[in-house]
Amino acid sequence: MNKEQFERALLELKAGKDDIRPSDVVVFSEPLRTALNRAVRIGRISLTDLARELEIEREPAKEIAAILISRHLFQISAFSNEKETFYETRLSAMTRPLARPPSDIFKKLDN
Amino acid sequence: MSKIVSVHSFRGGTGKSNTTANLAALLAKGGARVGVVDTDIQSPGIHILFNLDESEMVHSLNDYLWGKCGIKDAAHDVTGHLGTEIKGQVFLIPSSIKAGEIARILREGYDVGLLNDGFRDIVTELGLDYLLIDTHPGLNEETLLSIAISDVLVVIMRPDQQDYQGTAVTVDVARKLDVPKMMMLVNKIPSAFDLEDVRARVEQTYKVKVIATLPHSDEMMTLASSGIFSLKYPDNSVTLGLKAVVDEIVRS
């Protein structure tokens, strides 16, 4: 991930306040999208692996992970230890409290 | 290692539920432990194919999503309902058919993340070899979620212009979600169409392998979802096509 891709990823992630939904992942730019697809599919990812998927260092990966935590896609796993942080992934489609989000999938896909 | 398989189509009426039920039965016939989740909450129906009567439904997917029960409590062992000796097992997690419950869940919504949790938990809790997800047609967060966590995606379409256009959207989205294995099944092909021509056209259009081209079947229509077609007609050409899909899923 080069600097421009990193900045774009941060912008995309910070643009929304709701939980990250599957339709959000579809429109994220690369390499963020592929990295998140992998994390979602395996259910848990370490900070080291996240950094490797994003092709960045640990500190910027941590910055991205923090936003993903705030948007409830990631949560710190009980597997985490002093040497490594693990994140559990959980795709959602709800805002909190429980409410059905607006159906704007096609708007996102068209954009 | 267990596999999650989503069966999806952009439009309704393509034969998703029938296909899902048949794939599950064929996998179980081969000795596998198979789970089936009906995520078509708005219009559930796969329970009919498994002869699971509403009165037998202790809990449904709806109950799990409302936090009334664990996902395992909503799983019904329907192996004995299949009407034939099966080496493996089939567990069905049905959606509620009660109008009030359907209306409630549509009105109030639910946390789709619970589906994500439920899929993972049920694979572990029941020791499943395969979890098949029967999806609602079209693109919504639930179907995207299913695709996002699946190891295999079976896309079903008919040789119909509406299906052609909509399937392009599905295939594009599935590629963006990096589905490890995607395959296509073309269903309900009129007798006037050449099956190989249909296969070639679809493969060229979407650059996805077509595992089976299934002809329109009067026997299937006559059976009318009263049972599992492939178990009743094991030598029918439609069953042979479904077996090819099963083989591809197993190989994936």
Image: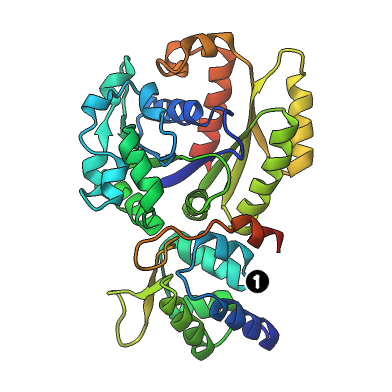
Other residues around mark 1 within 10 Å, as few (<14) / some (14–19) / many (≥20): some
- Tell me if residue A49 comes above or below residue A102 in the rendering: below
How was the colour assigned to the protein in this rendering?
Answer: rainbow
The answer to whether residue B195 is left or right of residue B103 is right
Q: Residue A91's quadrant in the figure?
A: bottom left
Image quadrant where residue A99 sits: bottom left
Does B105 sit left or right of A58 as displayed?
left
- The quadrant in which residue A104 appears is bottom right
Total marks drawn?
1
In the rendered image, residue A32, in percent from the top left (x then y), is placed at 59, 73
The residue under the point 59% across, 38% down is B9
Give the left or right position of residue B141, taking residue A110 as reference.
Answer: left
Q: Position of residue B197 (x, y in %)?
A: 79, 25
Residue B46 percent location from the top left of the image: 41, 29
- Residue, x 57% and y 53% (percent of image)? B179
**Seen from this angle, which residue lies furthest bottom?**
A59
**Residue that carries the numbered disc 1 in the rendered image:** A30
Q: Amino acid at mark 1?
A: Glu
Q: Nearer the viewer, residue B231 or B192?
A: B192
Residue A39: horizontal and vertical position, in percent?
A: 47, 67
Q: Is residue A98 above or below residue B151?
A: below
Above or below — where is B72 with respect to A98? above
Q: Is residue B107 visible?
A: yes
| Residue at x-position 47% and y-position 81% | A67
Residue at x 36%, y 27% (from the top left corner): B47
Between B146 and B245, the residue placed more toward the observer is: B146
Q: Please, is residue A47 above or below residue A43 in the view?
A: below
Please give the chain letter of the residue carrying mark 1: A
The kind of secondary structure element at disc 1 is: loop
Instruction: Report if residue B129 is visible in the image.
Output: no
